[in-house]
Image: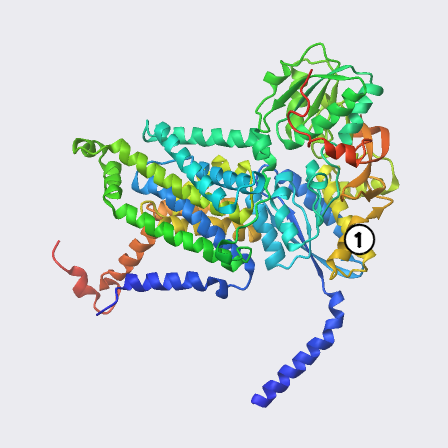
Amino acid sequence: MRVPSSMISWLVAVAALLALPWLVTSDYYVNIASQIVIAAILALSLNLLIGFGGMTSLGHAAYLGVAAYLSIYLTAHAGFGHLAGALIAIGATTVLAMLFGFLALRASGLGFLMITLALGQILWGVAYRWASLTGGDNGLGGLKRPHPFGLNLMDPAIFYYFVLAFLGIALWCIARFVQSGLGQSLQGTRDQPRRMRALGYEVWLIQWLSFVFAGFWGAVAGLLYAYYHQFVSPQTLHLTTSAEALLMVIAGGTGTLLGPVVGAALVVILKNIVSAYITRWLILLGVIFVAIVLFMPEGLVPGLTRWVRALRNRPPADKPADAPSVAKGPAR
Amino acid sequence: MVRTRIFLSTTVLAAWTALTPLQAAEPLKVGFMTVRSGALAAGGRQMEEGLKLCMDEHRGEMAGRKIEIITADTAGQPAVTKTKAQELVERDGAQVLIGPLAAFEALAIDDYIRQTKTPIISPSAAAEDLTQRKPNPWFVRAVGTSAQAHHALGEYAAKDLHYKKIAIIADDFAFGHELSAGFQRTFEQNGGKVVQKLWSPLNAAEYGTYITQIDPSVDAVFAGFAGGNGIKFLGEYKNYGMQKPVLGAMTTVDEGILKRMGDEAVGVISSGWYSAATDTPANKKFVEAVRKAYNADPGYYTVGAYMACQFLNNALEQVKGDISDKAAFMKALRSVNISQSPYGPVKLDAYGQPILDVSIRKVEKKDGRLQNSVIKTYPAVSQFWTYGADEFLKSPVYSRDWTAAK
């Protein structure tokens, strides 16, 4: 029996991710990896909307920020335990996603984009202004990382495995969701909303459920974000954070499972590592993004897959020896 | 073959152990967090200039040790600042940090500094609570708190200028709130009254809507702006034909932006813990060096970073360049005492905050350029003004609604 090559590449990828803390020399890179993982969860959740639902949102930082604010406020300032704080933060953020879903899904396309943008900006304004609760632009800190099952999350490697486990669960859940009847019908509403409606599907409900599901994973990312940074400020809720998440999804490849993960790695690495060597790293980010749009408009993951496939299936025409015989091929 | 290898490795090992006593000659690594991209980049550049000037002055050596500065760009974003602090401490092995620029950046790494016990000198972040209600044992500041200089201006406005009614217009963020509250507190304590408080967004495109709201019966307007907003405000204030005198925060007419202003700035009275026009030998030398190197007057950020570097030098000299005992180094850093500096004599209080001379300054045109001429000096001003630490810390931190306008 032959093991499919895709299986092998998956195994290699998983093994590499698990071995990472031993491969890199410094805690700094382990911490960067944790940041990539957290960003990847956020991008995955946004990709549910953009890639599979065709709903481009510019307000996804809302879930990241609200969950982060809530968990820090509840555990560090309101005296809740870590588990209670985490559960309430994720629960309340999911409820917020339900509410936002009601509002935003009244429109589609550009209207949807603008409503999510507006809702996100409202939250940013609240965080900025409600200083007694959020600390205003000085932000909110003081959170200690929890010790679940006796694990010391202050250790960078252990924290990395902790967030990696969440990424694994997120990937599995989202993959299952996409393959499920609901996920399939969501892709149906993306491509043919009117036909789906004619077939008797409740398009709005399908979109709303997916919206809430995406909000839930955004909240999980927010919780991990709070644990990682132990600090949150209005910047987290800002439009730039939403736009960055959108960039990760588009750069990596919308509607693919791994695209957002690759996109998250790209953006986080550029922002944190490359910026140490290149002062004008924002320009580099722009150039890379333009290059992606020009050469692989579908995103890095589908684009590279296409290139690899094209290379493999390249007609042997390029080989100089027997070029003439094959190049003619079947008559045109 | 094997034997030669063993022989080689033992020699190397022996050589290495022989070298360890010389460790003190190893360069001391200083992580410097600045901002090179985004809205705060102008201040970041001035910080770099100030730091470079100080390093050049010491020829890259302090207390007999080479100093290696490792610079990181935080982009003015709290999340990036945290990563950059990790980069400097964990990857590059920085033993001391200088930075970051903004208060929210300093707060974002507050927990991290405590965990890693890394001494940090703040060259600009002014948030009051960093050295008040949430003092960090590893943190000292080289500049004034938001309100430190503005307590003095409040008293000056009431006692010396005899203003009774004032309207405040300031940037709507923590720094603006804190400096306005400090001004208001001492102004009202000395019989004045703040009748109006207008908060304009940090990224306001124009100030017309705010200027037209100003109560016409006030004696003067207090303008508390940061960044480049002072330029925009004063320009529009003049264009609207406003005649009321303007009092400014230190950053409203900072030297860093003064060169981009015109006659509209002349006559603005402000207070600050520094003025480029201060007439002392130490400051004259400093200003000349900055003018020569960068063709500009030193402002808030230039002085802040320059002095942060001088603090480092002073502390290192106290411990003779040996930073291995962090607690001892921190103690030295907390007992920094410099008698002559661009901003005058300085020592630190128990919270790691400088006690500084504060000057009342008036914008004047001299030799074709605008300058903040010193018209009065309040010597050795504490962050707690005259209230004393205990009484001061009892009240909540200055905020947007610290006291409403009457």
The image position of residue A57, as x and y in percent, is 38, 35
Name the one closer to the observer, B63 or B405. B405
When the figure is inspected, residue B47 is found, relative to residue B30, above or below; the finding is above
Quadrant in the rendering for residue A206: top left
- Disc count in the image? 1
The image position of residue A138, as x and y in percent, is 61, 36
Quadrant in the rendering for residue B342: top right
Residue at left 88%, top 41%?
B281
Name the one closer to the observer, B118 or B69. B118
Q: Which quarter shows the N terminus of chain A?
A: bottom left
Name the one closer to the observer, B314 or A90. A90
Q: Is residue B99 left or right of residue A12?
A: right
Residue type (three-letter) at the residue carrying disc 1 = Ala
Quadrant in the rendering for residue B194: top right
- The reply to whether residue B148 is in sight is no
Residue at left 21%, top 68%?
A322
- The reply to whether residue B315 is in sight is yes
The image position of residue B98, as x and y in percent, is 69, 49
Name the one closer to the observer, A21 or B36. A21
Circle 1 SS class: helix
Binning the other alpha carbons within 10 Å of mark 1 as few (below 14), some (14 to 19) or many (20 upward) gives: some
- Coloration mode: rainbow
Chain where mark 1 sits: B
The image position of residue A256, as x and y in percent, is 32, 48
When the figure is inspected, residue B213 is found, relative to residue A165, above or below; the finding is above
- Judged from this view, the residue extending furthest toward the left is A331
Q: Is residue B107 left or right of residue A193?
A: right
Q: Which residue is mark 1?
A: B332
